[in-house]
Amino acid sequence: MFRKAVTCILPWSIKRRALHRWFGFELHPTAHIGLAWIFPRRLTMGAGARIDHFTVAIHLDAITMEANATIGRGNWITGFPTRTQSPHFQHQPSRRAELILGESAAVTKDHHLDCTNLLEIGRFATIAGYRSQFLTHSINLFDNRQGSEPIRIGAYTFVGTNVVVLGGSVLPAYCVLGAKSLLNKAYEQEWKLYAGVPAKAVGEIPPDAKYFSRTEGFVY
């Protein structure tokens, strides 16, 4: 705990070396972490990847951020790590308590990411706005035990503000999830606008929309 507290306040040039030496994290020289509490079991950050101030990431197996992926301010990222003595999730031996962000994927700020099971956000995807919840675990009422399922957010997607995404959900590539929607199932059709409670396909996405062919993650 002492080492974790110390690393949080160190200048980045020193912090990066301390995180590698003390915790074995793999951080590209151009990656950056602000004043944040980021302590999964494993952390891998590619070139230009960034985590901003006041984000917390604890109790999960791994975070992998590919080149130029970003996590903004004030996000709460948590889970339930594997290889514990807890009776929770023992019936799911293949469970992965991980967060994966593809190239230039972006999580903005003030979101809650539950990574009890895998949460995968595809390349050039944007988790936009504020206060969205991604919940990979819940209580299985029929079996009376904790259960979890992965969530997959496809490449070049746009997830609107204040949504709820439940375990087992899939937002296909080149799609939009409308603001305040509830995504609670796995969809397959690309180039769709999904919206509502629960979300369903309500419109088409034009393939010539420039957001969906970006070669840089940053949107001016």
Image (tube, helix red, strand yellow):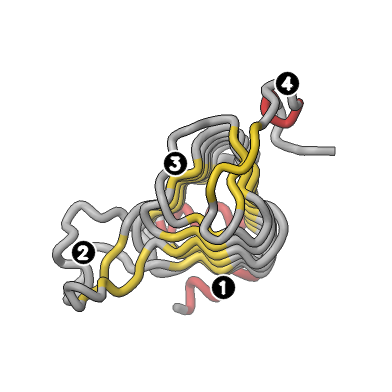
Residue farthest toward the top in the current orientation of the protein? 208
Residue 60, image quadrant:
bottom left
Residue 193 percent across, percent down from the top left: 62, 41
Q: Label 4 vs label 2: CA separation?
A: 46 Å
Looking at the picture, tell me which residue is in the foreground, 17 or 49: 49
Q: Label 3 vs label 1: CA separation?
A: 44 Å
Amino acid type, mark 2:
Arg
In the displayed structure, does residue 54 sit left or right of residue 61? right
Q: Is mark 4 on a helix, strand or loop?
A: loop
Q: Is residue 47 above or below residue 26?
A: above
Q: Can residue 211 be spotted in the picture?
A: yes
| Label ID, residue 6 | 1
Q: Along the polypeptide, which appears first: circle 4 or circle 1?
A: 1
Location of mark 2 (residue): 83
Disc 4 versus disc 2: nearer the observer: 4
Q: Label 1 vs label 2: CA separation?
A: 27 Å
Amino acid type, mark 4:
Asp
Location of mark 4 (residue): 208
Q: Can residue 25 be spotted in the picture?
A: no
Q: Which residue is drawn at 69% across and 52% down?
A: 128
Q: Along the polypeptide, which appears first: circle 4 or circle 2?
A: 2
Q: In this view, does 87 lie above or below 186?
A: below
Amino acid type, mark 3:
Tyr
Q: Along the polypeptide, which appears first: circle 3 or circle 1?
A: 1
